[in-house]
């Protein structure tokens, strides 16, 4: 089980490669530039929804980007949740 | 240190060799870990595969050759060097004679590699 932190926009190689390698049982936490891909109705959100991994969005970063209210397909998590996730997953991999 | 105590580390190398200091930093990290007898595997992916090209003349840029450093990986006990097969195809490098012997992996094999490594580092 791997927790992927995805800090890159949908047009990037990091986004593409992360989605290619994340599998069932993994989580993908969108943060930083990664949050934009979660906007409902966007093509990138469809790609994320099709991933076998669980997709989550860091709430503060979504709010900072001004898109918090445009995210409806994925759960928003706060910093405490981020810490809990880090504890639950033995491996973490940063995509940026 | 017994083998049972050893943790395996997978370093994902994703940056082109001379556009930033990240490429060299990731190689230095891998060599340092290997020098302390950790089990280190490397996975070159995306632009990172460009680090493996032979005949890099980086002295023309006033920089040390990353290719030469990578050529010394076996001396540090780093035997397993993996590459993303799709990245090789993207750059037309399948079958290239790289600075070290590499093992091309498809998506599923790369996911398995991530799952069985104790630590993951991405540069």
Image (tube, coloured by chain):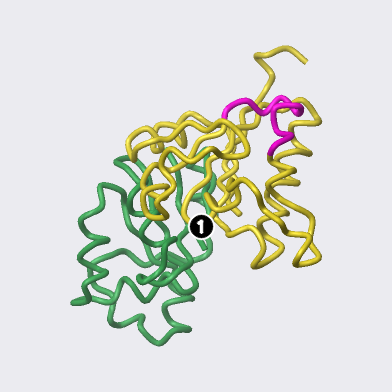
Chain colours: A green, B yellow
* Residue at the farthest bottom position: A66
Q: What chain letter is assigned to the residue under label 1?
A: B
Q: Is residue B9 magenta?
A: no
Residue B24 image-quadrant placement: bottom right
What range of the chain is rendered magenta?
Answer: B71-80
Whole-percent x and y of residue B88?
A: 42, 47
SS category of the residue bearing label 1: helix
In this view of the protein, which residue sits in the foreground, A87 or A51? A51
Position of residue A93 relative to residue A64, above or below, is above
The residue singled out by tag 1 in the image is B47
Q: Residues within 10 Å of mark 1 (few under 14, many from 20)?
A: some
Question: Does B5 sit left or right of A7 as displayed?
Answer: right
Which image quadrant is residue A48 in?
Answer: bottom left
**Magenta stretch containing residue B77, yes or no?**
yes
Name the residue: 31% across, 52% down.
A54
Quarter of the picture holding the C terminus of chain B: bottom right
From this view, report whether residue B15 is shown above or below residue A41.
Answer: above
From the viewer's side, name the closer residue of B40 and B2.
B40
- Percent x, y for residue A9? 41, 72
x and y percent of residue B67 in the render? Answer: 68, 46
Q: Nearer the viewer, residue A24 or A11?
A: A11
């Amino acid at each position: 089980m791997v927790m992927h932190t995805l800090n890159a926009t949908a047009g990037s190689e990091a986004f593409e490669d992360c989605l290619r390698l994340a599998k069932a049982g993994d989580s993908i936490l969108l943060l930083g530039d990664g949050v934009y891909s979660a906007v409902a109705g966007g093509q990138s959100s469809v790609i994320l929804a099709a991933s076998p991994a669980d997709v989550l969005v860091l709430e503060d970063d979504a709010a900072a980007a001004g898109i918090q209210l445009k995210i409806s397909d994925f759960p928003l998590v706060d910093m405490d949740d981020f810490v809990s996730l880090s504890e639950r997953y033995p491996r973490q991999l940063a995509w940026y | 240190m017994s083998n049972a105590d050893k943790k395996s580390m997978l370093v994902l190398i994703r940056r082109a060799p001379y556009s930033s200091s990240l490429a060299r930093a990731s190689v230095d990290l891998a060599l340092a870990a290997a020098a302390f007898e950790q089990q280190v595997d490397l996975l070159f992916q995306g632009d990172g595969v460009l680090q493996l090209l032979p005949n890099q003349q980086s002295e023309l840029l006033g920089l040390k050759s990353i290719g030469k450093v990578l050529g010394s990986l076996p001396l540090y006990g780093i035997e397993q060097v993996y590459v993303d097969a799709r990245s090789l195809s993207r750059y037309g490098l399948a079958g290239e004679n790289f600075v070290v012997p590499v093992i091309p992996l498809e998506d599923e094999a790369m996911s398995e590699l991530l799952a069985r490594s104790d630590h993951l580092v991405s540069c």
